[in-house]
Amino acid sequence: MQTEFVIETRGPGLTEFTGEVARWLAGAGDGLVTLMVRHPSASLLIQENADPDVRLDLLGWLDRMVPPADDPSMSWLR
């Protein structure tokens, strides 16, 4: 069985889609879930979400590691 989830985003950031997958799983029964992210600049992060500050900390770290392309520190990009 193959199901496609279409998740629209509004630029860089973290997008929570656990609810969509959980609802699908509730009707699908037991089995294995394999998720494939088809966008070339996207990745899948699995975390517990117990503390909302973790999400903010992660976004801050990502901004420091990879600033936006228009940031002066990224002037070497073409």
Image (cartoon, grey):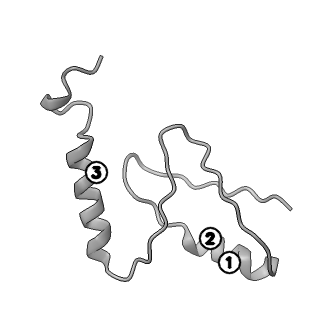
Q: Is residue 70 above or below residue 31?
A: above
Left or right of 74, for residue 11: right
Q: Position of residue 9 (x, y in %)?
A: 47, 51
The relative height of residue 58 versus residue 19 in the rendered view (above or below) is above
Q: Residue furthest left?
A: 72
At mark 3, the secondary structure is helix
Residue 23, given in percent of the width and then of the height, sits at 68, 78
Q: Is residue 25 above or below residue 78?
A: below
Q: Amino acid at mark 3?
A: Leu
Q: Residue at x 45, y 60 (%)?
A: 15
Q: How many marks?
A: 3
Amino acid bearing label 1: Arg
Q: Earlier in the sequence, mark 3 or mark 2?
A: 2
Query: What is the distance, in whole Å, between disc 3 and disc 2 at their CAs?
Result: 25 Å
Location of the C terminus by quadrant is top left
Q: Which mark is residue 23?
A: 1
Q: Nearer the viewer, mark 3 or mark 2?
A: 3
The kind of residue tagged 2 is Glu
Write down the residue under mark 3.
62
Q: Left of 6 or right of it: where is 13?
A: left
Q: Which mark is residue 20?
A: 2
Mark 1–mark 3 Cα distance, whole angstroms, equals 30 Å
Instruction: Look at the numbered discs 3 and 2 and tell me whether their residues touch, using CB distance below 8 Å.
Output: no
Residue 58 position within the rendered picture, expressed as x and y whole percent measured from the top left? 29, 61
Q: Are marks 1 and 2 in contact (CB under 8 Å)?
A: yes
> As drawn, is 37 to the left or to the right of 1?
left
On the rendered image, what quadrant is the N terminus found in?
A: bottom right
| Residue shown at 42% from the left, 49% from the top | 10
Furthest residue in direction front, as rendered? 32
Q: Secondary structure at mark 2?
A: helix
